[in-house]
Every structure is written in structure tokens, then in C-alpha cells.
Image (cartoon, rainbow, N blue to C red):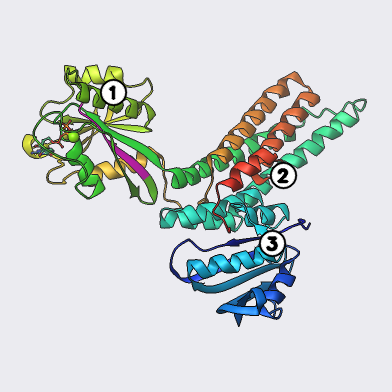
Amino acid sequence: MEHGDTIAAIATASGRGAVGIVRVSGPHTAAIAREMLGCLPLPRHATLLPFMVAGGVPLDEGLALWFPAPHSYTAEDVLELQGHGCAVVLQQLLERTLALGARLARPGEFSERAFLNGRLDLTQAEAVADLIDASSTQAARAALRSLQGVFSKRLEALVSELTELRVYIEAALDFPDEEIDWLSESTVTQRLTNLQAHMTTLCSDASQGVLLREGITVVVAGRPNVGKSSLFNRLAEREVAIVTDIPGTTRDVLRETLHLDGIPLCLSDTAGLRSTNDPVEREGVRRAYRETAEADHILLVVEDMVGIGPEEQAILAEFPVGSVITVVRNKADLSGRPVGLSEGLLGTEVTLSATTGEGLSDLMAHLQGVAGYSTSEAGEFSARRRHLEALRQAERHLSTALATLAARSPELLAEELRLAQDHIGEITGAVTTEDLLGKIFGSFCIGK
Ligand SMILES: Nc1nc2c(ncn2[C@@H]2O[C@H](COP(=O)(O)OP(=O)(O)OP(=O)(O)O)[C@@H](O)[C@H]2O)c(=O)[nH]1
Ligand SMILES: [Mg+2]
């Protein structure tokens, strides 16, 4: 499939760089190449050539790469001009391609064409953006695996299982007179159960992928002076927050992103929670509570000598119902208690000293467990929240399908299976809307 117009963009990041790349894709690409290079380079070979602007004036010289359709990223004719990374020169080269009939590419439009031309499915195209945005080696590796089709293949396997079952049931629908005792055939129940099990495994592997990409938000909260900022600085490995022995030091919410074995952890330090007449501090407390409402996890810091007293009880009552909380018993160097994990009233407690750093590794390991990340590489691939939601929807339809077995209605069963398949189709792009594509590709970089 060819798209009518030819698109062009600077593919490298803006600013100075050793190399700068202009990329062109579409039907006019060959003509643009001849004008700007004086010839059409050998396909898929790096050719050193002058890059010319209007009137045949050379403006730069570099490697020209010519990828005739369909053996290119977009599956269209593609030209890449790799010149010196001078912003002015790159801009002029780009303008020359526009004068020769190309138009400026929208963000992600090269990848969108790759998707529309069947070179990549949607999860692979999204993996391209995820690889570019990866914030850790693990996240990059997972994105590459998705780009290479690991996630797509798992989805394909699920779809083919689903299709086989649908064919079998549709057959029962087509021959209603031939009283096939299709339900008593244990195969239907068995296949449905198998499908559901595969779906559940895929969901849990995909949620690992989402975790690698999005990470978790953790807020440090508690009474004034218990050592929240000291702990925050320790975890951030730098002196971000002001620490003093005056209760009520922190007012604003401070944020730092760190990595826990590849998972991004967005950590925030907050004002000490207490009732006060100081309007500035009161605002700080309000913001602190708001932060706890939005976090995936709350670290409730208490002084180990004090534990969970009436003040802490009052604070706990203000946390949103269902909050996931870990009590951090700080200042272990003063209490003299051994650091590490123990079981308390609210579940796991971590005893540590923000001053000496003892017990900190226990907290990190605990957080990793809480995030639900397992370091098995086998199922590792990148995924997005939208994939997970679609998988969960599909899972729900499979459960309903199992429930309809008792009603002995092949129509209902067929419908639930169709809906489940549609949801999986949304992930790979087999079923899409303009809206969804706009949202996905709109967040890409220009030139990708
Ligand atoms: N001995 C000891 N002192 C600590 C420890 N952690 C913090 N402190 C001290 O406790 C005091 C308060 O520390 P901060 O980190 O500012 O406490 P905070 O909870 O952020 O306080 P607010 O911002 O006022 O709510 C400071 O004097 C710290 O040096 C610890 O593990 N051991
Ligand atoms: Mg503080």
C-alpha cells in the first residue's frame, strides 16, 4: 500500500551533534534523491556523496542511504541523508526536500506508515517509541523484545487458539439440527480453560512489561521530624531535601526518579503530617495527603522508639481506603534494634537508619517485591497499560464464556469469544480506530 504523499523530517535530536540525519519516505523519494545527490545511490549501500540544495549547490557531504520499497522501515522508498549535525544545514536540507515535493512528517508518521503497510503491528510500533523512551537497560531490552515480535507472537498464539475454538462452535451453530452434543464434549470446556490459563499468564507477563515502562510511585509520609527527608535523600543518593531538627522543615512535595533493578520508581518527600495554624505548613500537609492519595505505595515513616502511636493512627485514618502501606521504623541507630524486615500490625515493617544507611537495602528489596517485579527474563517484553486493559477485557469475556456453558447456548458462547478476540485485536492493531492511532503515533518523536 502506497500513501499519496512523501514525508520528510530531521530524524536526529535537535542541537549540535556529530551526525545529523534527514529522512524521506514516499513515492517522490527517488526524484528527490536524484536532485539532491545527482544520482540514485546503490540500494542499501552507504555512499559518500555531496548533498545539494537549490541550483545544485553542495551544502554538506555525507553518507546517503537508499532503501527502495518494500525493503525499508516504512515499506516505501526511503532515503536517509547522514550529514554533519549542524542544525542550520539540516534545516536547509529538509527545506530542499520540501521544495522538491515532500511535506513535513508528523510525529511518528514513519512508524505509522510501517504499521499501515504491515511492516510492524501496533505493539511493535509502540515498542519503537518505548525503546527510544526507555529509562533503564532492562526497559530497553524489553522494548527490543517486543519490537522483535515476542509479545505479538504470544498474542498470535492466543488468537489462533481462540479462532479454532470459534470455528468449532460456529459449526455447532450452523448445524443446529444435528444435535451434536457439543457441550458434553469435554474439549470445549478443556479448551476454554486452557485459553483462560494462557490469557492469565500473558496478563501477568504484560503487567511486568508495563511496570518496566511506567514504574511505581512511592510517597514518603509521616509525622514531622521522623526522618522522611533524610530517608528520601538516602534513596535519591543526593542531598535534595533540606534536613533540620526543626519539625515542619519540608513544605513542598519533592520528587526524584530512581531505578530499582530497572523499574522506574518515582519517589516523593512530603511535609510532616500534623494539624497546624501556620498557613504555609497547612498547605504542605494538604499536598502531602493529596500525594498519598495518588501514590501506588506509601512509606509511613515512624521513629523506631515510638512506633505506631496515636498520631500515627490519626494519620492512617486520613489515608485513602485500600492504600498499600509499608511502615518504616527509622532511627534504628538510636533505638539499637537490629535493622531489617519484621511483621507488624500493618504488615511488613522495615527497621533502618536513614543516618547510617543500615537497613536501606532491605527497604529497596522490599519495594521491589511490593512492585510485583520478578526478574525472570523469560517472559520479558514491554507492554503498555492499554494492552493490559485489553487483555483484562478479553479475560473477562472468556470467564463469561465459561459461565455460559451451563446455559448450553452456543450463540452466547460464540459472541463472548468474538468479543474476546476483538479485544486482542485492539492490541495488535487488527481492530483499530483513527482515534487510537492518532493517540499512539502522536506521542512519537518527529522523524521516527
Ligand atoms: N539519629 C538519627 N537521626 C536521624 C535519622 N533520620 C533523621 N534523623 C534526624 O532527625 C531530624 C529530622 O530529620 P528530617 O529528615 O528533616 O525529618 P522529616 O521527617 O523530613 O521532618 P519534616 O520535614 O519536618 O517533617 C534531623 O535532625 C535528622 O538528622 C536517623 O536515622 N538517625
Ligand atoms: Mg522533611
Whole-Å distance between the Cαs marked 3 and 2?
Answer: 29 Å
Q: Amino acid at mark 1?
A: Arg
Whole-Å distance between the Cαs marked 1 and 2?
Answer: 46 Å
- Where residue 324 appears, as percent x and y from the top left, is 35, 29
Compared across the picture, whether 59 is left or right of 411 comes to: left
Front residue of 383 and 108? 108
Front residue of 240 and 447? 447
Query: Along the polypeptide, which appears first: circle 3 or circle 1?
Result: 3
Which callout, 3 or 2, points to the residue nearer the camera? 3
Which quadrant would residue 74 be assigned to in this image?
A: bottom right
**Quick one: label 2, few (<14), some, or many (20+) residues within 10 Å?**
some
- Where residue 300 appears, as percent x and y from the top left, is 25, 30
Q: Does the CB distance between marks 3 and 2 fall below 8 Å?
A: no
Q: Amino acid at mark 2?
A: Ala
Q: Does the CB distance between marks 3 and 1 fall below 8 Å?
A: no
Which callout, 1 or 2, points to the residue nearer the camera? 1
- Residue 266 part of the magenta-drawn span: yes
Which quadrant would residue 201 be assigned to in this image?
A: top right
Stretch of the chain drawn in magenta = 265-272
The numbered disc on residue 102 is: 3
- Where residue 191 appears, as percent x and y from the top left, is 70, 37
- Residue 241 part of the magenta-drawn span: no
The numbered disc on residue 38 is: none
Q: Is residue 113 above or below residue 81?
A: above
Residue extending farthest bottom: 48
The numbered disc on residue 430 is: 2
In percent of the image, x 12 and y 25: which residue is there?
306
Point out the quarter of the image occupied by ligand 1.
top left
**Quick one: label 3, few (<14), some, or many (20+) residues within 10 Å?**
many
| Residue that label 1 marks | 286
Compared across the picture, whether 377 is left or right of 175 comes to: left
